[in-house]
Image (cartoon, helix red, strand yellow):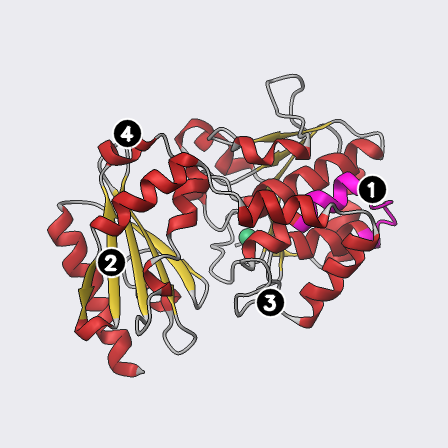
């Protein structure tokens, strides 16, 4: 298990560290990228050598964060996993690092405690909230670029401040980031208003696959690996469709099943507040938050679906 650190202890470790490698989770989202990028800019601003590593390419829409990616330019002296809830989320390409993580900064209550030390706040809406507090404690000047990175993490993990994880603290930090120069209008446009053509293409295919269960209380969409490849959708496009089934009137559990290149099924479960998505996924070897969780299933699609629906039915009965 990890040694649990508070903000001050985590900060003192970071300030002593040199050649810092910041690791994002695979299928990178705005929070893992924004939090790692904010740390990268802050640490390099303090005169340290740092870089960001991710098993998958960083989606082009996050290009404004101007991240320094790790390409082997230094030998890592201190390794930090950012928003990575478990070692399975590192991705095969960088799996070798999983044994040597010095610090994990995360907000997933399900975090398995794989790092030597952990700065975990399960009440934070995003890892970006924790990073903001870390940088504030360090007295780091929140530049407009750092503000953009942290705003990206906060806003994407809360669905633009709409999800139930959003708190007064989330809004307070967002206000400080806006005051520090976050490009609110431009970022909201990029992150929440514009949709790529590949996103629309995958949305169309996903809606064609829509199936209802339990009298319309559960809706499932499914995408094969060929369909995903055909639309050219990137991870952000795919993440974006996971809220589609839950957003249908009367649906309490929305499930998105997408086949992975190696054949397994990555499952995203989104629920209304009354139903616990994390519990559904925990029974299937996954985890996450109360209204947004996931798991990965092997075997045939029919088996994957029936295992999922069995757990959904149990969760709906409790409600
Ligand atoms: Mn997050």
**Which percent across, then down, holds residue 128?**
66, 52
Spatial CA distance of label 3 from label 4 is 35 Å
Q: Which mark is residue 205?
A: none
Visible in this render: residue 273?
Answer: yes
Q: Residues within 10 Å of mark 4 (few under 14, many from 20)?
A: few
Front-lying residue, 14 or 144:
144
First in sequence: mark 4 vs mark 2: 2
First in sequence: mark 3 vs mark 1: 1
Spatial CA distance of label 2 from label 3 is 26 Å
For the point 30% across and 35% down, the residue is 228
**Which percent across, then down, holds residue 134?**
76, 52
For the point 68% across and 50% down, the residue is 151
First in sequence: mark 1 vs mark 2: 1
Using the image, determine if residue 119 lies above or below residue 252.
above
| Residue that mark 2 sits on | 220
Residue 17 among those drawn in magenta: no
Chain part drawn in magenta:
136-151
Which secondary structure, mark 4?
helix
How many labels were placed on the picture?
Answer: 4
Q: Is the CB–ligand 1 distance for label 2 below 8 Å?
A: no
| Residue that mark 3 sits on | 166
Spatial CA distance of label 3 from label 1 is 24 Å
Q: Quadrant of residue 18?
A: top right
Which secondary structure, mark 3?
loop
Using the image, determine if residue 192 lies above or below residue 308.
above
Task: Tell me if label 3 and label 1 are in contact, CB under 8 Å.
Answer: no
| Residue that mark 1 sits on | 143
First in sequence: mark 2 vs mark 3: 3
Mark 3 or 4: the one toward you: 4
Spatial CA distance of label 4 from label 2 is 21 Å
Is residue 165 shown left or right of residue 217? Answer: right
Q: Residues within 10 Å of mark 2 (few under 14, many from 20)?
A: many
């Amino acid at each position: 298990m990890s040694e649990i650190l508070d903000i001050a202890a985590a900060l003192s470790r970071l300030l002593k560290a040199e050649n810092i490698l910041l690791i994002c989770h695979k299928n990178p989202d705005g929070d893992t990228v924004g939090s790692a990028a904010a740390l990268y800019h802050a640490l390099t601003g303090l005169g340290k050598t740092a870089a960001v590593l991710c098993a998958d390419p960083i989606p082009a829409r996050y290009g404004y964060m101007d991240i320094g990616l790790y390409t082997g330019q230094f030998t890592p002296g201190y390794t930090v996993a950012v928003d990575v809830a478990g070692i399975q989320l590192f991705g095969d390409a960088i799996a070798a690092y999983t044994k040597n993580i010095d610090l994990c900064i995360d907000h997933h209550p399900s975090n398995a405690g794989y790092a030597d030390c952990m700065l975990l706040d399960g009440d934070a809406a995003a890892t970006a909230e924790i990073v903001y507090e870390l940088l504030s404690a360090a007295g780091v000047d929140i530049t407009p670029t750092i503000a953009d990175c942290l705003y990206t993490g906060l806003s994407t993990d809360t669905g633009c401040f709409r999800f139930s994880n959003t708190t007064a603290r989330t809004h307070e930090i967002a206000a400080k980031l806006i005051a520090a120069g976050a490009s609110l209008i431009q970022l909201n446009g990029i992150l929440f208003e514009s949709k790529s053509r590949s996103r629309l293409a995958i949305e169309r295919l996903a809606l064609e696959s829509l199936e209802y269960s339990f009298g319309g209380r559960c809706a499932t969409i499914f995408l094969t690996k060929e369909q995903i490849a055909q639309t050219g959708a990137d991870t952000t496009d795919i993440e974006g469709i996971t809220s589609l089934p839950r957003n249908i009137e009367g649906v309490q559990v929305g499930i998105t099943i997408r086949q992975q290149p190696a054949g397994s099924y990555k499952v995203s479960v989104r629920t209304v507040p009354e139903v616990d998505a994390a519990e559904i996924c925990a029974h299937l070897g996954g985890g996450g938050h109360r209204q947004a969780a996931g798991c990965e299933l092997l075997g045939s699609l029919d088996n994957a679906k029936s295992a999922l629906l069995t757990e959904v039915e149990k969760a709906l009965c409790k409600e």
